[in-house]
Amino acid sequence: MRGARLLGLAVVVAGVWAFAPGTAEAASIPAPSCNGGGCGGWFRSNVTVSWSYDKAGVASTSGCGSATVSEDTTGQTFTCTLTLSGGGFMGNNVTVKKDSSPPSVTASFARGPDVDGWYTSPVAVSFSGDGGPSGIASCTSGTYGGPDGADAKVSGSCTDGAGNVGSASASIRYDASAPTVKPVPERPPDADGWYNHPVKVGFAGDDAGSGVTECTAPVTYGGPDADPAHLVGQCRDGVGHLSAPVALDLRYDGTKPAQPKVNAQRASQTVTLSWTAPADVVSAEVVRAPGPKGKKPAVVYSGKGRRLVDKRVRAGARYWYQVKLFDRAGNVSSRTLAVRPAVGIL
């Protein structure tokens, strides 16, 4: 409008207004700027409003200095009025909106807990917020389905009209899984993976959610011989989930081999032993008393054979030979025989 003549005319256009009672040289309409740019939309930080205009033909101004908006507001209006030197006036309005506070966010579950404060299957979760001056533009939602935990966290967010993002998390007790179970024998196998006397076996469970409340009671296995014997157990957690059965395959043989039949042949400088052994025997051992190096008993044979020729004997001396038979589970049977090597010609 600069350079135009206003002949007793009042003009109002989109917040811009002017009035001149007579002919006057018009100044430029004041233009606002916010932080050096446009003033539309929402601001999330302090806003400095300033005005620009052509000072020619302006006698005085009102409200045209810079001002700062520091508080959140749905709209604060600023007015710049120019009084013209030729009479009349013109001005402009601008409304500034500011929202610098993230929304407060609340989580809501689609249903209450399933068992004793615990959720046992997936549950829908939505988030809502208080958006302040600019209102809520959007919020997240979803479904929680694990992992299990006594203090699992469900997180979400909301965004307000100014672009501020608020977030929140809620705790949930979640257990959708049965316990894991393992058998716990009271001791390792006795020999080569085999047990040869009674063993107690318990069952221990682990549960990341509500915890284990009970397991199959310990059982003592002492027969019959088996390869394997199946010992089965389960555990239950605090919300009632029952684990799948878990088996311990236990190899058990508590039966001694049949005693050997031992035969001895004497000569003046040797004793020859032979013995029988049933099919389940895996090794034999012969202990002689006194031993070759003194009065103490000593092992003079160990192996899978069925015969021993003892050449470290004295004619006329008396010896005791104990033949031991071992099966695969470490069971032992034995027989002892007294032998005196011959003196002279047999």
Image (tube, grey):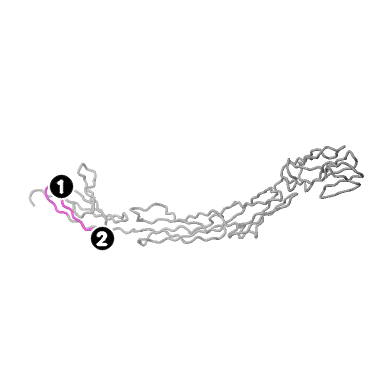
Residue 1 higher or lower than 121, as above or below: above
Q: Nearer the viewer, residue 44 or 341?
A: 44
> Label 1 to label 2, Cα distance in Å?
29 Å
| Towards the viewer: 14 or 159 | 14
Q: How many marks?
A: 2
Foreground label between 1 and 2: 2
Which amino acid lies under the numbered mark 2 shown in the image of this protein?
Ala
Q: Would you say the residues marked 1 and 2 are in contact, meaning their CB atoms lie under 8 Å apart?
A: no
Crowd rating for badge 2 (residues with CA inside 10 Å; few <14, some 14–19, many 20+): few
Residue at the farthest left position:
345
Q: Position of residue 95 (x, y in %)?
A: 79, 46
For the point 37% across and 53% down, which residue is it? 189
Q: Please tell me which residue lies in front, 20 or 218.
A: 20
Badge 1 crowding class, 10 Å Cα cut-off, few under 14, some 14 to 19, many 20 or more, is few
- Secondary structure category for the residue under label 1: loop
Label 2 SS: loop
The residue beneath circle 2 is 279
In reply to whether residue 159 is colored magenta, the answer given is no
Q: On the picture, is 150 further left or further right than 59?
A: left
In this view, the residue in front, 253 or 234, is 234
Span of residues in magenta: 264-277
The quadrant of the image that shows the N terminus is: top right
Q: Amino acid at mark 1?
A: Lys
Of the numbered discs 1 and 2, the one sitting upstream in the chain is 2
Residue 201, label in figure:
none
Residue 97 location, x and y as percent? 76, 47
Q: Say which residue appears at 65% left-offset and 50% top-offset.
A: 168
Q: Which mark is residue 311?
A: 1
> Is the residue 42 above or below the residue 108 in the image?
above
